[in-house]
Image: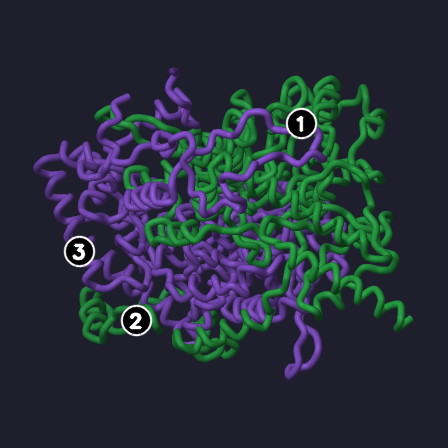
Chain colours: A green, B purple
Amino acid sequence: MPFNPHTPKDVGDMLAAIGAKTIEELFDEIPKELRIESLAGIPDALNEMQTGKLMMARAAQDGMPLNFIGAGAYEHHIPSAVWAVTTRGEFYSAYTPYQAEASQGTLQLIYEYQTMISSLTGMEVSNASLYDGGSAVAEASLMSVRAHRKSKSQRILVPTTVHPHYRKVAVATASGQGVRFEEIACPKGYLSLADLKKYEGEDITAIVIQQPNFFGALEDVDAITDWAHANGALVIGSVNPTALSILKPPGEWGTKGADIACGDCQPLGVPLSSGGPYAGFLTTKMEFVRQMPGRIVGRTVDADGHQGFALTLQAREQHIRRGKATSNICTNQGLLVTAATIYLSLLGPEGLARVANESHRRANELVAALVRVKGVKLAFERPRFHEAVLQLDRPVAPVLAELARRGIVGGFDLSTDYPELGNALLVCATETRSSEDIEKYANALTETLKAAVRAA
Amino acid sequence: MAMQKHPEKIIFEYSRPGRGAFGQWPTERDTPNEIAADIPENLRRKKPAMLPELSELEVVRHFTKLSQLNFSIDTHFYPLGSCTMKYNPKACNAFAMLPGFLNRHPLAPDSLGQGFLACMFELQEMLKEVTGMQGVALSPMAGAHGEFAGVAMIRAYHRARGDLARNEIIVPQAAHGTNPATATMCGCVVKEIPVNDEGDVDVEALKAAVGPNTAGIMLTNPSTCGVFERRIKEVAKIVHDAGGLLYYDGANLNAILGKVRPGDMGFDVIHMNLHKTFSTPHGGGGPGAGAVGVSARLLPFMPIPVVGREGDNDAPKYRWLTEKDLPQSIGRLSAFMGNAGVLLRAYIYMRMLGREGMHRVGEYATLNANYLMARLAKAGFDPAYPTRRASHEFIITAKQQKNDLGVSAMDIAKRLLDYGFHAPTTYFPLLVPECLLIEPTETESKEALDGFIDAMVAILKEAQTNADLVKSAPHTMTVRRLDDVRAARQLDLTWKPAAA
């Protein structure tokens, strides 16, 4: 047992203080017939050196392919300082800040995070995170039902331009409480007002708008927001925080702004890491703050009148309200909030905008290079941000498999989630992709498509 | 609001226009930073976001200083009951952050993820072994998320059998608040049943509570009272006979690791807090991981994705199973694959513990808790369940101190901070008055425990001789007790620049 400090003498002294002869005796309240003698299926212990060899071999097995997938998880440069500071034991090995006086570091950091995310989204208040961008859409949907007291339908409109996984998470999370999600097909790759016409005059609780949408295309957020408000529905924006440095924030959409804005902090200094841990964010207008799920930190004063920070509005939460809480969520992705806050502080307003602009420029360069390849064309002519859908002249999966053999992760195959789009491939580039990377992909794709023709 | 005492300014107060960590920018600072022409004017941001403008050193110094205002496992004994604040081995972090793991895109083909997927598959197998369950799904991202998955599976099971009336979830009074909150989220009705004087579920009340509407019961064992539920087999029989299922809240799995398994006790579904029992960091409020384990009858309902293995043992191939493989699944609970990096840390920890190490976790956690309880009882504190063994944790009630001296559990908790110890969990479970739920974990030395006992003894003495000192604690932190009422009434949730 590598991490127990007990010497045989310690054990003897401690048992004597307890008045027991053996450690075994301490388990005498457990019915004998339930006890197990061994865990045969667990392998022998490895020391740290052996563990290191195993893990390095496993990590190396997956290689370091050149990545061109975004689809909700984006490969950005991560400053060394982000994780050097985030993994300090005082952040890494602390608990949720229930003892405020002994957790001022985490609490102040969350207050600063709330400020930054509120400003990025153009909203008034932010919570201290949710699990990820998918759970954020789910929680925002549940929140909209609580916030919109006039609407009785619990109907939420979700265009298919919202991330398909986010839509699935929302259904799995919220349908138990009777929330109904109605999908609006968007064959043109964006949500048009014409698609909404048939819902006019109906009781709709909210509509979810993703900006940029799952295809990278930009939605007409002003028009949709105004349409929703004119028809009595709340607006939930699911947004990319990097893009918000150059795109209109949800708080300014349309005449009145979105009511809830959410998304994933992953682009802000969080590594791809096979899908997590990431962190969801959720912001809203002050009038809805009591309907928010999750932790919220407030600035207050101590007994001497000095500034201090504490968890607040806890009457919404499960440890107080139990069955009547706004959500069962408690501890979630605190350490990722730490990373995102440090990232935003390092990049600043101009640095973040430069990341967004450079990512978009690289994505345009990528699209231009790939549509020059015979058999590839752009699926949608639509303003976009750092991601686009390509149409291939043949099924996507074998092409991606061949690219993978060449060490290139060529994009996300849309055929499972969007069979109506045919041989569609979602590609992305960020500031981390160089012209050489893009050329390498274009060449590999050219060769792959040519080779497939020959094979046929 | 006086500002002078708090040792670290708000980050925006350091900000200066034109400053930056320029080495982090993707383009040179003297090149233009223009939005591409293809982004329409009406969709652009007009006013920059309010983010601080600072040099890299200023950022590092600010957040390093903030970190130093925290108590943590690395710096302090942290006996927070029901939270299992054990040492988080550095190797788990170092190896989970190898570039090959960090750079892997969640939607990258399985062929470029065999190393990672092998770890996940083996983690599923090891968790099945230590819990006695038949299947494990890794995607829930916290204990409460795992609870949601578990109750959703119970509901899906009854529905699939056409048993539509079963929507009641029975929860003991002492349960974590997440249990009833989760049941509500799943569209269930919560029925609470009492706990008896010795901390066990009131079996007669349970018998009266079950019926044709019973979907299941949510139990923690050892319970939140810090004692083993001795009549668990009887409880399981009563619930099963009534047609309900048993849910195991794995918050306290550390107590029984390698000694007894939820699957053998009769539980149908469990969640495991990998950030407790398997030592992944708590991170100042996550990320956790709430993997779920199921009995055979719930296998079809597991949340996706799950890692499957194909091919023979010599050349196994791993892949994510999706709704195609598990059409009755309760669905997808995370955008991708849950907290993959946390799962890697748990995997690494389990490999370093190995078979023997697993047994010792439960043994030494229990030894430490019983030692602390015996010594504190001798020193004049009252265990809430004096006739019982402690599990990996136990409850002290400060009811006597509150009545005689006016010193509450909260006062003792705050005074402990002055002595350099993180406070135990206070006022949970709610049914024990003035309670302190104390969990030392197996990684603390006898000297650390003795230091805590000395502090508790000293505080008791202070309570008898100078109660105000305890009641006004803490005195040595950067802030004194905070005004929670003001925090909630005069909401100040974001920093705003002073009016010019």
Foreground disc of the pair 3, 2: 3
The residues bearing labels 1 and 2 have C-alpha atoms spaced at a distance of 59 Å
Label 3 and label 2 in one chain: no
Q: Residue furthest right?
A: A456
Within the image, what quadrant is residue B257 found in? Answer: bottom left
Q: Residue A67 or A49: which is nearer the viewer?
A: A67
Indicate whether B30 appears above or below A82. above
Foreground disc of the pair 3, 1: 1
Q: Are marks 1 and 2 in contact (CB under 8 Å)?
A: no
Q: Residue furthest left?
A: B465
- Residue A94: % across, % down: 35, 49
The residues bearing labels 3 and 1 have C-alpha atoms spaced at a distance of 55 Å
**Type of amino acid under label 2:** Ile
**Type of amino acid under label 3:** Gly
- Residue B443: % across, % down: 31, 64
Within the image, what quadrant is residue B417 found in? Answer: top left
Residue A23 tag number: 2
Q: Secondary structure at mark 3?
A: helix
Within the image, what quadrant is residue B167 found in? Answer: top right
Q: Is residue B328 in view?
A: yes
Q: Is residue B463 left or right of residue A189?
A: left
Q: Secondary structure at mark 2?
A: loop
Q: Residue A61 or B271: which is nearer the viewer?
A: A61
Image point 59% across, 41% down: which residue?
A356
Q: Which residue is mark 1?
A: A235
- Residue B153: % across, % down: 65, 52
Indicate whether A197 appears above or below B284. above
